[in-house]
Amino acid sequence: MVLAQSEPTRVLEVANNPVLWILALSVMGIVILQSLIYMISVKRNAESAGMSQKEVNRAFRAGGIAALGPSVAVVIVAIALLPLFATPAVLTRVGLIGSAATEVASASLASETMGAQLGSENYTVPVFVVALTAMSISGAGWMIAALILTPIFKRSSEKLEQINPALMTIVPVAALLAAFAALTFREVPKSLTHVIAILASALTMFICLWVARRFNAAWLREWGLGFSVIIGLGAAYYAHYAGFGAAS
């Protein structure tokens, strides 16, 4: 007697279709190729920008280290989503474009419009197709916005440089600080655990920068973000199990 497959099992079979694997790997290949072209171009044109090859290598190393923390978070989320969307969809939707929270919210809303829940027995192949389409449209918004707004911002930056070159050193830094501040303060009301994690990571970063400046330890500036992420995660773990929990 052959047992009938459950709907989630059939969804995973469709989600692991070889065509989807080919498309996902093609996208990954393009991203890797773009990264290699960018790195080679930077190395070739470093001198015209007043940078030595040593400074370029240091910048690449700092960027790679800084990416470790966010990458670990993405990997953890991706592993959690694999039973729902399978590897090809997770690879392209969460691993490359958009954010996990946005993608999952889009998929959940699309599933609910068809009277289904993600991962439940009524999570059928048609529901998966609609959810994946919603995720794709949601992610496409990021790409279209970048495609349209990047040339506009470039022209604006060129005009600002002509008016006041000092503004172009202030505006990017201010925008970066505002973006990180917005992401940080959004977590504060959630629970005391979140607050402890923020304070622990901020204190760690402050100490790393102070030690790097005091003892001329340039490497510590590069590793500071990684240390901050690890200490913040550890503080959040112990705070949670100490009973601080989530906000009511």
Image: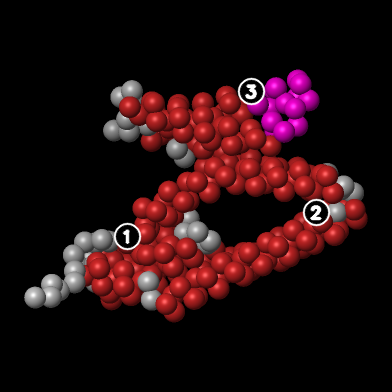
Q: Is residue 177 left or right of residue 141?
A: right
* Image mark for residue 160: 2
Marks 3/2: CA–CA distance: 36 Å
The answer to whether one can see residue 150 in this image is: no
Q: Amino acid at mark 1?
A: Pro
Q: Residue at x 77, y 47 (%)?
A: 57
Percent coordinates x, y for residue 34 in the rendering:
68, 66
Tell me if residue 233 is in the magenta stretch: no
Q: Amino acid at mark 3?
A: Ile
Dot 2: what SS? Answer: helix
The crowding category of the residue bearing disc 3, from other C-alpha atoms within 10 Å (few below 14, some 14 to 19, many at least 20), is some
Which of the marked residues, 3 or 2, is nearer the chain's N terminus?
A: 2
The crowding category of the residue bearing disc 2, from other C-alpha atoms within 10 Å (few below 14, some 14 to 19, many at least 20), is some
Residue on which the image places disc 1: 83
Q: Amino acid at mark 2?
A: Leu
Residue on which the image places disc 3: 207
Percent coordinates x, y for residue 243 in the rendering:
30, 24
Which of the marked residues, 1 or 3, is nearer the chain's N terminus?
A: 1
* Image mark for residue 206: none
